Structures are given as structure tokens and as C-alpha cells.
Amino acid sequence: MTEKTFEENIKRLEEIVRILEEGKCSLDESLKLFEEGIELSKKCNITLDDAKQKITLLSELESGE
């Protein structure tokens, strides 16, 4: 199974937030969505941290540090 892109994960996370804010799900469904949202949030944070490290490294190489 291929890993989803950052953009796909963000889109799904936004969808989960919208669904949860509507408040029409059962408690069980809400908990499953919340858990999925937490996992997506972790993946997005890792992707952003990796991008930040790459930018920092490239900036240091460019400036000759």
C-alpha cells in the first residue's frame, strides 16, 4: 500500500474535524475518527519536521556554515 501524501493526509484530517464538529456520529465512531486524526496529525508533523530539517541543512550549505 502506498503512503499518502502530506496533502492527502491534511485533507483527510480536515474531513475528520468537520465530521466530528457536526456531532452526528456515535461515540464509537467519534473515537475511531479521533484516533485516525491523531495518527494523521503525527504523520503530518513528521513530514513537516523532515522538511524543516532539509531547509535548515540547505540554508547552512548555501551560507557556507
Image: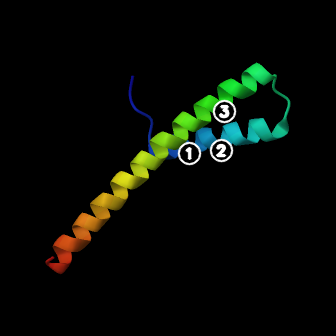
Q: Residues within 10 Å of mark 2 (few under 14, many from 20)?
A: few
**Amino acid of disc 3:** Phe
Residue visible at 66% across and 24% down in the picture: 32
Q: Is residue 60 above or below residue 23?
A: below
Residue visible at 46% across and 48% down in the picture: 45
Mark sitting on residue 53: none
Q: Nearer the viewer, mark 2 or mark 3?
A: 3
Which residue is disc 2 drawn over?
A: 14
Q: Residues within 10 Å of mark 3 (few under 14, many from 20)?
A: some
Q: Residue furthest top?
A: 28
Horizontal and vertical percent for residue 15?
A: 68, 39
Q: Quadrant of residue 51?
A: bottom left
Residue visible at 80% across and 41% down in the picture: 21
Q: Quadrant of the N terminus?
A: top left
Q: Residues within 10 Å of mark 1 (few under 14, many from 20)?
A: some
Determine whether the residue tagged by mark 3 lies in a helix, strand or loop.
helix
Mark sitting on residue 10: 1
Q: Quadrant of the C terminus?
A: bottom left
Residue visible at 49% across and 41% down in the picture: 42
